[in-house]
């Protein structure tokens, strides 16, 4: 999302502080695919969504945030290179594309759900298109759906489609914690599709993803994440996720077999980092590294610094606190 100067300044401050607190080397594309990769395409500078292809193993779909156009990029995780760019037609001009998810029957859903006005647009859009059988640059006609919320306009960066039912969900982005919104059983091209809140999400959410078997929902923020058990739509918090430190963590996807969670970031040449997914995400999934159910996270998610950084967790918490305080001061100014 293109943010006003105050917000961009806060993000820059966070990046600077984090760089001083931790020397986190950027990983290069190493051919291990679902073990992580680097996005090499210079056209992809604001990767804001990530979705693992089911039709093409090793391919991840992504898109830029705003000011790019109606484009989707297919990135080969073995090399980090773009192997196809899709141009969407049949839709209006995208405003703030923030999320991508793949539902049943290899249907790609794109969430033009960000709100540069801070939650004042009367409606947002979802685009749906079939994932192409052949990976090559192409123009694809998409279906456009108009979306509103039952409790008023809001900003959001997380859209997920359940892999079994095809139902679409959105999580709004709120620094003090948001909600999971459920869409109609079937989206309609006539009229508005009203999304209703069904569960609280105690996180400043920037993306989310369903496990391939549909039994887990992972939600990430800038500094933390939460894993939820998904029992026919009944959401139960399981514990924290090991969210890596990134320049501006905006995207999340499960690997195709459900064994990994793939965390992406905005920025040119950005890394996609793989972490073990929570146990039970698939039959192949190893025991996850998430914290126990009893662990708690503050509403912004800043308390969920990962165990991988050891003693550095305290530094992350301090950096997060400084960032949030700085942003509040800027807003008040």
Image (cartoon, rainbow, N blue to C red):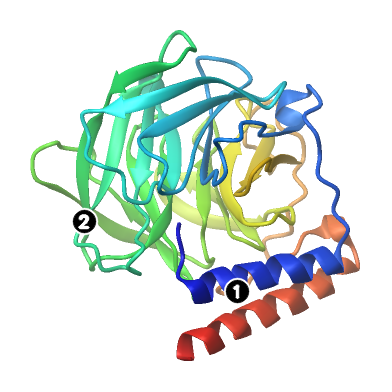
- Pick whichever, 133 or 220, lies toward us: 133
Residue 122 in the image: x percent, y percent?
19, 62
Q: Where is residue 14 in the image (x, y as percent from the top left)?
A: 69, 70
Label 1 element class? helix
Quarter in which the N terminus is drawn: bottom left
State which quadrant residue 220 falls in: bottom right
- The local crowd at label 2, few if under 14, some if 14 to 19, many if 20 or more residues have their Cα within 10 Å, is some
C-alpha gap between disc 2 and disc 1: 28 Å
Does 58 appear above or below 308? above
- Give me the disc on residue 10: 1
Residue 50 visible in rendering:
yes
Left of 126 or right of it: where is 134?
right
Q: Residue 313 carries which label?
A: none
SS at mark 2 in the image: loop
Q: Which residue is drawn at 26% across and 46% down?
A: 125
Horizontally, residue 12 falls left or right of residue 114, namely right
Which label is found at residue 123? 2
Q: How many marks?
A: 2
Mark 2 and mark 1 in contact? Answer it, CB < 8 Å: no
View extreme (right): residue: 311
Q: Quadrant of residue 239?
A: bottom right
Q: In the rendering, at what x and y percent does residue 229 appear?
A: 54, 48
Crowding near the residue tagged with mark 1, few <14, some 14–19, many ≥20 C-alpha atoms within 10 Å: some
């Amino acid at each position: 999302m293109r943010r006003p100067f105050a917000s961009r300044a806060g993000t820059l401050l966070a990046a600077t502080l984090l760089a001083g607190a931790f020397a986190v080397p950027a990983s290069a594309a190493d051919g291990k695919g679902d073990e992580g990769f680097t996005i090499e395409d210079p056209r992809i500078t604001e990767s804001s969504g990530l979705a693992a292809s089911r039709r093409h193993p090793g391919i991840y779909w992504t898109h830029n945030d705003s000011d790019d156009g109606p484009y989707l990029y297919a990135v080969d995780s073995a090399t980090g290179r773009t192997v196809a760019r899709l141009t969407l037609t049949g839709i209006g001009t995208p405003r703030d594309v923030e999320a991508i998810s793949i539902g049943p029957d290899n249907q790609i859903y794109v969430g033009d759900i960000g709100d540069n006005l801070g939650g004042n647009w009367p409606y947002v859009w979802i685009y749906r298109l079939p994932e192409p059988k052949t990976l090559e640059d192409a123009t694809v006609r998409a279906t456009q759906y108009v979306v509103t919320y039952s409790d008023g306009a809001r900003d959001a960066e997380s859209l997920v489609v359940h892999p079994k039912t095809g139902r679409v969900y959105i999580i709004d982005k709120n620094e003090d914690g948001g909600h999971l919104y459920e869409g109609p059983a079937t989206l309609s091209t006539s009229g508005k599709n009203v999304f209703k809140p069904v569960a609280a999400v105690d996180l400043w959410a920037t993306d989310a993803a369903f496990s391939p078997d549909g039994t887990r929902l992972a939600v990430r923020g800038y500094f933390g994440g939460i894993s939820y058990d998904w029992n026919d739509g009944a959401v139960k918090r399981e514990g924290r996720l090991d969210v890596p430190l990134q320049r501006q963590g905006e995207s999340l996807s499960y690997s195709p077999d459900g064994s990994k969670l793939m965390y992406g970031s905005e920025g040119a040449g950005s890394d996609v980092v793989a972490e073990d997914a929570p146990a039970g995400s698939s039959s192949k999934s190893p025991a996850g590294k998430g914290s126990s159910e009893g662990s708690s996270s503050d509403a912004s998610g800043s308390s969920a610094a990962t165990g991988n950084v050891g003693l550095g967790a305290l530094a992350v918490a301090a950096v997060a606190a400084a960032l949030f305080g700085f942003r509040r001061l800027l807003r008040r100014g």
